[in-house]
Amino acid sequence: MRCQRLVESGYVVLSLDNRGSSNRGVAFESPIKHDMGHVELNDQIDGVQYLIKQGITDETRVGIYGWSYGGYLSAMALVRASNIFKLGIAGAPVTHWDGYDTHYTERYMGTPEENPHGYKVSSVIHYVNNLKGHLMIIHGLIDENVHFRHSARLINALTRANKSYELVLFPDERHMPRKFDERIYMEERVFEFIRKYL
């Protein structure tokens, strides 16, 4: 429904499964091994640049949003590709892979002891000083999947770097707001943020 609302409001919406996405086979999924947040972002950039070259979108008004891994990718877009992305909405983002579920993370990254450089350069926090554009962080405080400490670590890094951001919290929600009124509230804040900056 968010996509439809944006389209009806005059925005172009691109949904792109970058390399690393599941359900396309090992060859498509494996390029992120030991290095998350780079190949995926490059694929998103390629998609945006294609739209720009076709005259479909305005290169000065590009945003990205996502949840969980998509939230991670949205935050990475603002700290690593702010020349492309002017706005990012990061819902429940993983901000440093040393703090996420080991079963999932180690499948791609190995352990922090085996791959310290990969963990470092795959962290949003590593690039936080490069943040430009407008970042909104959304998180449920009782998120059982991506614990709130991910956003807390990012907020601490943003504060130290004197970078601005907007924050939407849901004290009684888990990984994704489920209550009807809170989902409505979230969608209104997201839409306002996009209208304000794009």
Image (cartoon, rainbow, N blue to C red):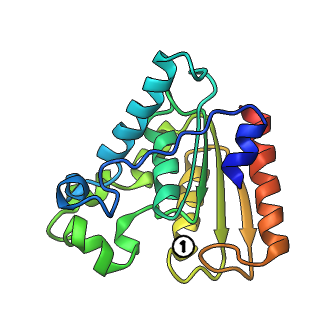
Q: Residues within 10 Å of mark 1 (few under 14, many from 20)?
A: some
- Quadrant of the rendered image containing residue 178: bottom right
Quadrant of the rendering where the N terminus is positioned: bottom right
- Is residue 79 in view from this perspective? yes
- Quadrant of the rendered image containing residue 91: bottom right
Q: Is residue 85 left or right of residue 19?
A: right
Residue drawn at (37%, 79%) of the image:
101
Residue 96: x, y in percent? Answer: 40, 63
Q: Is residue 28 left or right of residue 159?
A: left
Residue 124: x, y in percent? Answer: 44, 52
Q: Is residue 117 left or right of residue 61?
A: left
Seen in the picture, residue 63 relative to 94 is either above or below; the reply is above
Residue 4: x, y in percent? Answer: 71, 47
Residue drawn at (52%, 40%) of the image:
78
Classify mark 1: helix, strand or loop. Answer: helix
> How many numbered discs sit on the rendered protein?
1
Mark 1 sits on what residue?
A: 149
Residue drawn at (36%, 66%) of the image:
97
Q: Residue furthest left?
A: 114
Nearer to me, 67 or 7: 7
Quadrant of the rendering where the C terminus is positioned: top right
Q: Is residue 171 left or right of residue 128?
A: right
Residue 8: x, y in percent? Answer: 77, 39
Amino acid type for the residue under numbered disc 1: Arg
Seen in the picture, residue 18 relative to 132 is either above or below; the reply is below
Residue drawn at (50%, 28%) of the image:
84
